Image (cartoon, rainbow, N blue to C red):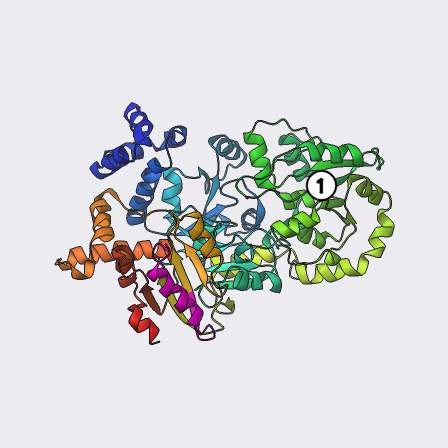
Amino acid sequence: MTKVKGVVQNMGNITNAKTWIKSGHLWNLLRKGKDKWKHYQSRISPKGLDALRLLYAQYYQECNLDENMILYEAYAGRGMICSPYAIFKMFGQRSDFTQYSHIWVVESEQQQQKLKESYNNSNVEFVVRDTPLYCKYLCTAKFLINNLSFPTYYTKKNKQVYINTWHGIPLKTIGFDIPEGRITGLNTIRNFLCVDVFLSPNRFMTECFQNAFLLEGISEGKIMESGMPRNDNLFHTCKSEIVETLRKAGVKLDEKKKIILYAPTWKGEKYSSPDTSTELYFQLMEELEKHIDTQKYQILVKPHQIVYKHIVEKGEKLTDKFIPATVDTNEVLSIVDILVSDYSSIYFDYLASRKPILFYIPDLQDYQKQRGLYFGIDKLPGPIAENLQELGGLLEDIPTLTEHFKDKYEQERQWACGNDDGMVCERVIEELIVRTNTEKLISFHANKKTKILAYSGDLQPGEERNRLENWIAAVDYNKYDVTLLVPHTATESVLNWIKGVDQRVRVLRRTGKMAVTKEQYKAADIIEKKSIANMALDADKRKELIKICQIEVVRTVGIVKFDYAVDFSGKSIFYQNLFNSMEYTKVITLQQLEKL
């Protein structure tokens, strides 16, 4: 273990990391010391994380799929929450639960230990994200259930079933509908191109998958429009159990009082660095307590899960009125009497309860400019307050407000939660895991357009980019579906150019690096520098290089079957090698492209 520690500490230097990877010492040492990986991982620089890709690639080659293994992950390991948890929870009530191995992904060893103590099932295991064991199970589980995305090194294996539940009906714009959508969310769309089945609660969310994420016409996955799995917890949660869960999490709760829950969405310019100010939470609780009978009501706060994570990491002190991100939101909603929210998708879920919803939106105009909303505020199924005094006043006359918004509430409930009958998870388990039957699900191939994948080159101003711009302007988008693959690294001017590309073009920015084994490092160098088609190779060596390319294609653009691929730079050996390895794709020149 001393050797492992020394190796990992020195991996800030990428050259040193590659030396150890090529020699095989790193692989052997880390496998022996994988239980201590998380302890040393914090000392590894982003470049040094090539080691983790090495481990993943090795398992990818070595491991066969376990037909009865299911891996669950929610919000990058935040906890047993959201729809993956609801599916697992329902599975636990079935007689065939013990026939499967259930692997839960968590974000820390501390969390892992707590959950191990809570679950004595021999077929339930907890693994810390971004560790060797995580990589192993990611390559072994036949079924993957995630509400967000897997790391950039994840590459879908043949016959693996990837089910994405997503994490709510959006009021805020998402995907490519966000002004910065082509620049951010790189790993999300990369994951989506690997998904076999998306779980959709309603027609609106189905259309978001099709259009906001630009999956229509390209995704090989399907959509199961059958309700929101996590809303099953509104129907099947035992009050005494969730109360006990909250108490164990440090929340002070009086079972005799009704609950008013304040649950806003995240605010800020980036999801990865949200506004973590806690002052508003305390001001809200203080003001609302002036307007309620505190002998009958109590106020709890549920910050958005990413906000809570950053608050804790900053070491800010929270009171016993704050609900941790590791507690399932929908189980909490099952005992809430009044919800106060803003643009958060939580209010769509709460509609299934038929209980009152109040909206506190002090920054509506700013938020609309920054992010954008799918619905006007006139669609909200409850009254809106722009300041805390107004919000407090609303709480004083809930019966009148409930009656006033009754019709609008029911209209919103029907389209948003019409499929939520408490049996959504049962349908998912039976149709996607037990029987794996997707024939009747919604396909993404309604338009039947010819699919073109084009590599952009470095996009610096000049003849090369001019030619690309002219082609984009001339494309018949009624006939062709265009995906433009652009480099991850780009100058500010290039990023601005990307933002301005015709909205009918699907822009994908390559993210992450190739995941190769120690034996394949030299082969990876060849792929980047030499044309496989022009090399004098024996059959086995050519087959090996093509296989590495095919794996990288899946990691980069998923399981999409493009009709044509073209390199606009005309000089990228790496992308030419990748394109030539694509089984269902015809690689063409710029001259051939112009004649299509």
The answer to whether one can see residue 412 in this image is: yes
Residue displayed at 25% across by 37% down: 18
Residue 474 part of the magenta-drawn span: yes
Q: Is residue 370 left or right of residue 73?
A: right
Residue drawn at x 56%, y 36% is 309
Q: Secondary structure at mark 1?
A: strand
54 w.r.t. 441: above or below: above
Q: Which residue is mark 1?
A: 262
- Which quadrant: the C terminus? bottom left
Instruction: Please give left or right for residue 341 compared with residue 522 in the image.
Output: right
The spot of residue 194 in percent (x, y) is 42, 57
Q: In terms of depth relative to the viewer, which is nearer, 28 or 263?
A: 263
Residue 252: x and y in percent read 70, 30
What residue sits 81% from the left and 58% below the top? 406
> Residue 425's quadrant in the figure?
bottom right
Q: Which is nearer the eye, 452 or 431?
A: 452
Hey, what amino acid is under mark 1? Tyr
Classify residue 589 by image quadrant. bottom left
Does the magenta-highlighted stretch encompass residue 328? no
Q: Which contiguous range is marked in magenta?
A: 455-482
Q: Quadrant of the N terminus?
A: top left
Q: Is residue 144 visible?
A: no
Residue 576: where, in percent of width, then height?
27, 60
